[in-house]
Image (spheres, rainbow, N blue to C red):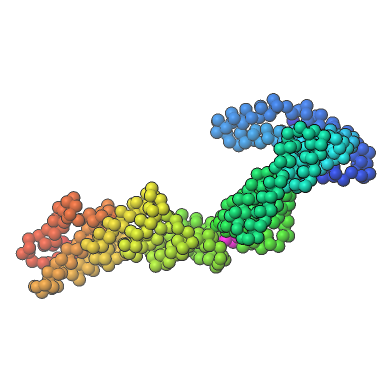
Amino acid sequence: MAAWLNSFVLLGGLFSYVLKYSYCRGPIFYSIMYHSGLLLVLLGLFLDAIGSVSQLEIDRHLELGREFLAKGQLQDALSHYHAAVVYKEAVIDIRILMRVILIEGDPNNYLTYYKRGTVYLALGKAKFALFDLDRVLELKPDFTSARLQRGNVLLKQAQFEKAEADFRHVLAVEPQNSDAYNALYKISPAQDDLLVADRLVRNGDYAAAAQQLSRVIEVCPWSAELRELRAECYEALEDYISAISDVRSTTKLQSDNTQGFLKLATLHYRLGQVEESLKEIRECLKLDPDHSKCFSFYKKIKKVAKLLTDANEYENERDYTNCIDSALPILKLEPQVAKVRFIAHQHLCKCYTGISEPSQAIKNCHEALNIRKEASVYCDRAEAYLAAEMFDDAIRDFKEALEIDMSLQRAKQGLHKAQQRQKLSESRDYYKILGVPRTASKRDIIKAYRKAAQKWHPDNFQEGEEKKRAEKKFIDIAAAKEVLTDDEKRAKFDQGEDPLDPESGKHQQDEVNTIKAIFGNITIAYRCTSDTNSGIILWE
């Protein structure tokens, strides 16, 4: 097996070499091939490889791969699947290599050129296939199958005049050849459609031009030029996804297409797909490390991608300060591309809410929604409005989110919470009563309670309206302390439900007990001491 693998390593290098120079035939090439004995070595390796590799060997690796996968041994399964693929590709490469050798050994054998050309077509290498078909027809001009094959390739590449010449030549020899007739019949309409498309592009009617070009591309799918033109139309229409599809095809149809990869990177970036953009620009630099435009763009989007990754991770970790510190520089690095700025504003919207700065959160949510209306961003802004106690605005945004996605649970739950919070705002807000923020700890709540209880103690007020007001205030303070120091009751209140609401009936007795605990009999004299451990005012 080791010897077999070594043979393939050597074959791989020799195959690349032979393919590179197979069309540069001359004294030097033939000297290398024959006088060094390379031909004999390659033939020996070929026979050795064919003897070692069989369909049974490939099937064996596939079966082992399935067995290891069933056992959960993923690495072993991957190794065997990879081996099966390598064997298959190696057999194909050897066959092409052998055709090269046979051709160089007999440069006038038109059938060998034809067979190799068909292999190239099967592998999607139309450029190399055309070279071989050209050579076939040089050697045997009356080989109709080769001429028809070449005509089809030329038609798919939108080389209409050359394709027409081949089809007419076939029909002159075989007037009843339906394949040639049907192919020839497609040329004139495709040419007319292309002329119309060109005129539409010049007039700026890109939607109609794209439709016309689509009809031509159905006939000529291997034309990189037509796909580039349609991509320009899609780009003008801001249909970047369709443009990406066409440009990606051109990178496969044309070798070393650095401009294609640069265009792909640009289009992905406009969609806010920064990681995809980074991947494509790296492909450009692989082809040409010194490409100035690709390198300049690479430096920029690499920074943006890093900041976006950091902002996302910090947001998920609820490290909101660092999230903001990562998102803000993105807006400076990218002042124009809206969908990249959208992502930065979305992070800032959430993270400013997380550090209790609702005004900044609302501002950034608003900027994000100006770029793209998304249900999740409406929910983000609604949460910021809730933090700012702007309940009507929060309710409106949750409803907007449901207009976009009526099944969004976050919007449904948020709307219910906002409506409950609005209802509570019209009654008692226990946080406001004690003068503490919603993020206050239990310790801060008890401290605020003691201070408020001391201030509004009824003994501090004379009989009359002031005393009645103090008594009511004191009841509210006690109720606030009861709710906010009880985790379960506080959680209910934060969700928009007053756990002491007499209207619910559920907690009526709690309210009565609270009042009795504070006042007992209404004629009792007010005197209190403080239990510093529990923070409860004890009445005697």
**x and y, in percent, of residue 176 in the image:** 76, 32
Residue 305, located in which quarter of the rendered image? bottom right
Taking the image as shown, residue 163 lies to the left or right of residue 442, namely right
**x and y, in percent, of residue 105 in the image:** 89, 35
Q: Nearer the viewer, residue 153 or 190?
A: 190
**x and y, in percent, of residue 489 in the image:** 25, 54
Which residue is found at the position 38% from the left and 57% from the top? Answer: 400
Which residue is found at the position 77% from the left and 43% from the top? Answer: 164
Extent of the magenta region:
301-305
Taking the image as shown, residue 225 lies to the left or right of residue 131, namely left
Q: Residue furthest bottom?
A: 462
How many numbered marks does the figure carry?
0
Which residue is found at the position 17% from the left and 51% from the top? Answer: 505
Tell me if residue 248 can be seen: no
Say which quadrant the C terminus sits in: bottom left
Q: Nearer the viewer, residue 259 or 203?
A: 203
Residue 35, located in which quarter of the rendered image? top right
Residue 186, located in which quarter of the rendered image? top right
Say which quadrant the N terminus sits in: top right
Q: Is residue 370 magenta?
A: no
Q: Is residue 450 above or below residue 260?
A: below
Taking the image as shown, residue 190 lies to the left or right of residue 394, namely right
- Magenta region, mostly helix, strand or loop? helix
Which residue is found at the position 32% from the left and 64% from the top? Answer: 389
